[in-house]
Amino acid sequence: MSWKRTHPCGVLNGDLVGHKVTLNGWVNRRRDHGGVVFIDLRDRSGLVQIVFSPEVLTAEQYTIAEGLRGEYVVAVTGKVQRRPEGQNNPGLATGEIEVYIESISVLAEAKTPPFPIDKQVDVDESVRLKYRYLDLRRKELQQALIIRHKVVHQVRNFLETKGFLDIETPILTKSTPEGARDYIVPSRIHSEQFYALPQSPQIYKQLLMLAGFERYYQIARCFRDEDLRADRQPEFTQIDLEMSFVEPDDVMELMEEMVLAVFKEHSNKTVTEPILRMTYQEAMSRYGSDRPDMRFGLELVDLSDILKACTFKVFASVLADGGVIRGINVKGCGTSFSRREIDQLVEKVTEYGAKGLVWFNIGETIKSPVAKFLSEEELQSIVQTLEGEVGDLLVVVADKQDVVCDALGRLRLFLGEKLGLMDERALKFLWVTDWPLLLYDEDEGRYVAAHHPFTAPNDQDLGLLETNPAQVRAKAYDLVLNGVELGGGSIRIFERSVQESMFKALGFTMEQAYEKFGFFLEAFDYGAPPHGGIAFGLDRIIMMLTGVKSIRDVIAFPKTASAIDLMVNAPSEVSAKQLRELHIQVKG
RNA sequence: GGAACCGUGGUGUAGUUGGUUAACACGCCGGCCUGUCAAGCCGGAGAUCGCGGGUUCGAGUCCCGUCGGUUCCGCCA
């Protein structure tokens, strides 16, 4: 007889009562009553209860049923029946029916799995990763990967209707300076030479625009050899796209349509639209972050102006050195915070790189460790500027501008979390626009690209590239969701001279620029269209949609924090022969 | 590169100021059981407490080192 499946388990319902069905799946759970055996049969679609009764089965078949164990793979044939009165299981999609089995075949027996498949238990992650194929049987991971598939499918459909072409770009490519550390692949044919895995398909997609494809996209695997985090893996996936003849608004508007459609389709949280926009400048000064979490207030307020004439040494010296003073009104926490909690804020801010935190506790009088150094007018204007009322706690940091922004920005997040101000049901999107083109890197002693070296400067700022690089704004935009960077993009440089200036600003000599990017610069000479694009972190989007805390929970076969695949045991040594062919000698 | 936390039967945990035989639940194995759905009842097996060293009469417990996992800082155009 045929064991070919006629229905998935999870779709069976009252409409099929009386039908004969063949099911294939795993034994999820077994309940043996001696005279009757119940099995929850599982396949990708869900669970259904199947019933083995000696009244229906031959003795031989019933013995097989009694021998079933967890994770056995079986094929069964039987009749769908309504459950007896009062025996429905409302917790199960198929809970109003059950299948009376008439014949069974065990397709595969199974050892007892090293951890429970059918229950949600926090199993040590190294065990889960070693037996990833078992972990992937669990509902949470199945659902994450199903959502992931659906999102990719939806994105492909969307981009298809907008005229985008899916074009693959090389995985074996060239190591380039700037950016993250490359994964390197040795060449067998060319001794002492190496390919690099792409950090992103950036240059290739721009060349596709030069080639005239006008609209490109790719669900692109990217590789970065940097240390991992809860939301970072060495290989991850970008929704990568590029368009010709566009301005920032064209890209942002199209992507807004796509992203909102995805989140409305797959999230039950509240999506706020349209997506707000804010310049980088404003984000930094109001929220102390280039990716502000818009779900709560606690905004940063500047106090530099009102304290211009202040004689308190800490403030005065910071202002004299060109620094700033900013504060946050922690509403109502003057009353509710203990001294210990306030001390913790001071500690946090020091951790975040500031020298200290000045606080003002507004009660009947203003309590503050620095009150005696400030005049009554100064105290009052601080309170007024921060709109302080009785019961509030004002926290103030004075330092160089980026230190103040960073410290208060992180303190704001810490407070938002501590005070439970983030609405867990809200999805607050934000475009952060007008990024600086360049940021000064103290360690390198030079400017580095805020996004990447191919980002176009704002037309008005072009002249500043050589005179005042820090002031040059870029045609760049990041999409932020609840304080998480979902993606970023820009309009690209499409003129050779501008690209050369950019490399110069980054400290390249022309020789270096041509050695590394000569092919690219040359390409601009053959009729380059204005173009721009964006890339989204697919893994992070799925994290936001599923609400999981770890990127490993949205990737089928992820690596540990030390970049190891515990299942296949990679990386691993290779044979002496392989090394010889690659002209590689290994130390020790 | 740095820091913190965790590591005890298959899984999740308990284990007091160092003290006899390492406890509990789930799972597993066997028996009973015809309406369960976290089935129930009875019985059983299963752990050199991640590994190495040290302190001590005595270490799961204290100390040092190491390995593994996780999180954070640095890093991530």
Image: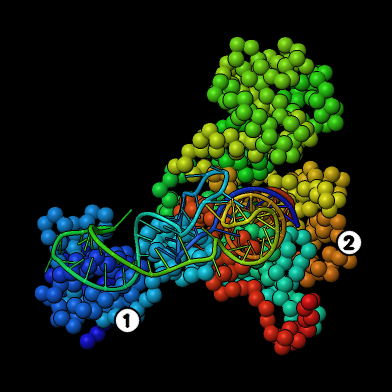
Image depth: mark 1 or mark 2 in front: 1
How many residues crowd mark 1 within 10 Å: few (<14), some (14–19), many (20+)?
A: few
Instruction: Return the x and y of residue A173 as percentages of the image width and height.
Output: 70, 73
Question: Left or right: A206 with respect to A428?
Answer: right
Quadrant where the image shows the C terminus of chain A = bottom right
Total labels: the figure holds 2
Instruction: Determine the secondary structure under disc 2.
Output: loop
Q: Specify the label residue A267 is tagged with.
A: none
Residue at point 65% right, 76% down?
A: A572
Residue A499, how many percent across, how many down?
79, 59
Q: In terms of image quadrants, where is residue A216?
A: bottom right
Compared across the picture, whether A52 is left or right of A309 comes to left
Amino acid type at image mark 2 = Thr
Left or right for A293, reference B40: right
Provide the chain ID for the residue under circle 2: A
- Is residue A465 visible in this depiction of the protein? no
Alpha-carbon neighbours of circle 2 within 10 Å: few (<14), some, or many (≥20)? few
**Disc 2: which residue:** A509
**Residue at 64% across, 36% down:** A411
The image quadrant that residue A370 belongs to is top right
Q: Chain of mark 1?
A: A
- Residue A117 visible? The answer is yes
Q: Quadrant of residue A85?
A: bottom left
Q: What residue is rendered at 83% in x and 31% in y?
A: A322
Mark 1, residue position: A107
The x and y percentages for residue A123 are 47, 59
In the depicted structure, whether residue A84 falls above or below residue A19? above
